[in-house]
Structure formats: C-alpha cells, structure tokens
Image (cartoon, helix red, strand yellow):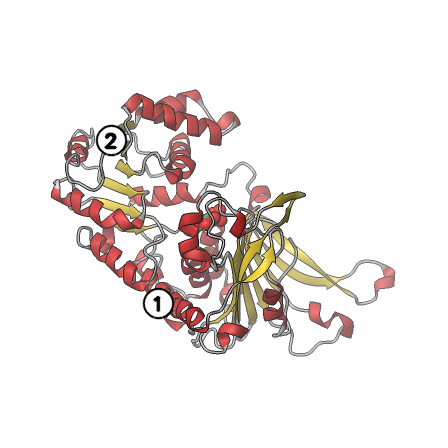
Amino acid sequence: MTREATPNVDLALFGALGDLALRKLYPALYHLDRDGLLGTDTRILGLARREHDADSFRSAVLATLKKRIKGKELEQACLDRFLARLDYTQLDFDTVDGYEKIRDWHGQSPDSQCPLTIYLAVPASIYGAICANLERSGSLDSESRVVVEKPIGYDLESSHEINDAIGAVFPESRIYRMDHYLGKETVQNLIALRFANPMFGNQWNQSQISHVEITVAEQVGIEGRWGYFDKAGQLRDMVQNHLLQLLTMLAMDPPANLDADAIRDEKVKVLKALKPLEGEDLNRHVVRGQYVAGTMEGESVPGYLDEEDANTSSTTETFVAMRLEVANWRWAGVPFYLRTGKRMPEKLSQIVIHFRQQPHYIFDPDQRNLAANKLVIRLQPEEGIALQVLTKDGGLDKGMRLRPGPLHLDFNHAFPKERIPDAYERLLLEVMKGQQYLFVRRDEVEYAWKWVDQLIAGWEKRDIPPRRYPAGSWGPVASIAMITQDGRSWYEDY
Ligand code: BG6
C-alpha cells in the first residue's frame, strides 16, 4: 500500500525558544522529516521575543536535536534538510506591529494551497491577544488553523474566556487543542482494542467489569516550575485533562464511525455522566497529597515545600487519588479508581480493567481472590497490553492450583523494527492532515472543568489539607485505605 503524502503546511511557532518547543516540538518535527512524513514544501517559522537571526535560531534548534536525539537517528542529510525549513522572526506578541511578517512569510510559500498553521507554545493567557493580532494583521485566511496547548484556563470561567477569544478568530473545525496523552500509541490502541475485538467489545460494561484503575505516576518533582505548578496542583495539571481524557476513551460508547465529532460526541457524554464528588464523598473517595523529603533510587530528594522558589506554607496537592463513578447504563456501579502524583517510585502510566469473577467458583478457596481476568494497558514505559488469565500450575504435585499469567502484547517486542513515535509526532502529523479526532473539543474542556471546579469548591469549603507522603513512595497511606475500604487493592505488578 502506498503511503499518502502529508500535505504541506506553513507552521508559525509562537514560543519558538521555549521549553516545549525545544524539548518536544523540534525533535518530533525532525523525526517526521526523517520518516518522510513532512510535506516537501513544509516550512517552519520560529517566533519569539528574543533577538535572533535565522542562522542563530537554526543553531539553537540543532543544539537541542543533538542533545535529544542519539545514534543513527541523527542523520546529517536529514538534519540539513530539516534546518533548511526553518526561519525566524523576532516578535513582541502583544502588539500587532510585526505580525505582517507572518503574512509576508506565508505569502512566499512555494505551495499556494498550504495552510498557515499557528502553534501557540505560550501561556494560555496570551492566546486571545495573539489570535486577535493575527487577524488584524491580515495573516489568516479561511484555511488557517491554530494549535493550542493545555491548560486551557484555570477553571470553567477562565476557560470560557480563552475559548471565546480563540473562537472569535478561528472556527472550532480549525482549532486543535492538544492533550499529548491522546497521541500516545497505547491510547489509540484502546480504540482498536475495544472496537475491533468483539471479545472485548462485548464485555465492556458493568455486567462483566468490576472496576477500573488508572495510574499516572511520575518520578519527577516540580523541576523549576514551582510558580506555575503551585497555582494549579495535580488535579488541574493532570486530572482535568490527561486522566479524564483516558477515562473518556475507556468509558465512551462505540462511536458510529471514526470521525472526529462522532468520537468526541461520545467522550462528552461520559464527562456529562461523571458523578460529582461532594459532601462526605470528598473525605471517603478523594485523597489529596503533598510530598515531603524522601529517597528516590538511593538519592535524597527535597520535599515540595523545600523546592526552589517554594512558598513554605503552600497547601497545593502534588498527588490525588479518587474513586469516580460514571452514572450511565453501561457503567452503573463500576468504580473508576484514579491516582496520579509527582515523586513516585517509578514513571508509570497504566490502566487496569478488572473483570468480574465467575458466578460459581470450584477451585481452592484460598485462591478465590485470584480468580478473575485483568487487562493491563501500559502507556509508559514499555507500551503494551497484557491480558492476565488463569491456567493450571504445572507439575504433578500441584493438583488444580491456579496460576495467573499474562498473554502479552509488548509493542517493542511485537513490532521490533518500528520505533514507537512520541505523542507529539503523531499529533503534529494529524494537524498537518487536518484530522481532529485526537484533539479535544471545546465542550470536552468545559465539562471537564465543570466537574473539577465543583470538586475544588468542596475542598475549599471543607478546608481539606493535603496529606504528606515521602518522595519515592506511592502516595499517602490514605490512598491505599481508600481502595481497601471497597475490599480491593491497587494493582501491583510494576
Ligand atoms: C504535563 C504536565 O501536561 O504532563 C506535567 O503539565 C507532567 O506536570 C507531564 O509532568 C507528564 O507527561 P508525560 O508524557 O511525561 O507523562
């Protein structure tokens, strides 16, 4: 099968020297180029406030590529081709003066059909001003697109303002709201797994599934982002977007087709069906945590309040665990246990689907708790899917003892020649193709905020402080008690 060529785009990148661009965007674009997935005439215009000319900008990009891409993937011919696509313009984002340079640059594209694609790798507070200036300067046309990063706001109200400001210039069909978790290989595999395999499709409901776990654990702490993070906290930074997005992909009903809106309509229904966490549930079903000094891989690490720039009286959470319910026909009575935190012992993102036990059990009563299937969907590290099944333990002396073992699909081993692309590669490629199904629609962002806002209001009203947990642990003991009170435990096969 021949691969369809990726359409050309003119990518104007705001925040061209920022952390996101250097760490994620240039490496992703380089990899796309190397894999033959950038249109021949695709060009990239870096925009930032700093003085640079095209050559010194290219040197900065080259330095980041050399730092982040190793071995044979860094090919001179490809580097030359990629760097030749780059140009740079110094710009004060707040005033319209200078924006005409974007219009003029786009006017010089060798492909008159290629859309101007604006990438806003800058804080959301200036999305509105940039969009308005782009419009005022006459840089946009009916094909121009915009890509924006999370967090879209701080709560429902601020997200409305930001979405309104973007929406005043771009129609929803040309707004690409990034959630990089949607670009992870295994997340898309969820769609294939659920909707291409009748074996799972038919079981995906409350009659067969007893509960679901979603863990997104990070080893990193705050890494120089204290000021930003302290205003947000783990609930806004991770749950409002990444974890709720994973939840919607897991819990949505089958879409009628793979069109962006068919999928997003189903995801929104899940967000609307999320039961609010309020009243006594805030104590029983939610745990907030904040890390204190501890040890990670043999090294002492400081607590959250001892990090650089810290305000030592902060009560911001760096960990959250919660028990959610999706109140609809498919999921009634099935708890979804979510947990995410900084400074955990491992970097691990994983979903575990626990299937119900057989209605009648005939084996060793001591093994009763073992006797259920689990589907473990690993996002990182080592992307893969494992179905845990029970077989008879081998050997003459074992009788009918059961042994759990995985039927394992490890993407690295199953497809050894294929490099697993970074989430940003896939998402950038989808933007270039003009496909929106992996991007978050406005109503998704807003329903997620609505749900998070009521939870935060409850915390504030009840003045619930975070519980301490040592860096390098799996979070406050209360997060273990939260699931144990339901007679369950967090899946532990790391
Ligand atoms: C970002 C958060 O969206 O996701 C960070 O702002 C977090 O705080 C990061 O560290 C985690 O992404 P990943 O892909 O490393 O799991």
Residue 465 % position (x, y): 50, 65
Q: Secondary structure at mark 2?
A: strand
Please report whichever mark, 1 or 2, sits nearer to the chain's N-terminal start: 2
The residue at 56%/72% (across/down) is 208
Numbered tag placed on residue 136 in the rendering? none
| Residue picked out by circle 2 | 90
Residue 69 % position (x, y): 48, 30
358 and 382: which one is in front? 382
Residue 242 visible in image: no
Residue 343 % position (x, y): 56, 50
Residue 59 visible in image: yes
Please identify the quarter of the rendering in which residue 422 is found. Answer: top left
> Does 283 appear above or below 34?
below
The residue at 62%/69% (across/down) is 481
**Pointer 1: residues within 10 angstroms few (<14), some, or many (20+)?**
some
Per the model, the C-alpha gap separating discs 1 and 2 is: 38 Å
- Disc 1 residue lies near ligand 1 with CB under 8 A: no
185 and 159: which one is in front? 159
Q: The N terminus appears in which quarter of the rendering?
A: top left
Is 379 placed left or right of 257 in the picture? Answer: right
> Does 289 appear above or below 218?
below
| Residue picked out by circle 1 | 450
> Does 41 appear above or below 222?
above
- Disc 2 residue lies near ligand 1 with CB under 8 A: no
**Pointer 2: residues within 10 angstroms few (<14), some, or many (20+)?**
some
Q: Amino acid under label 2?
A: Gln
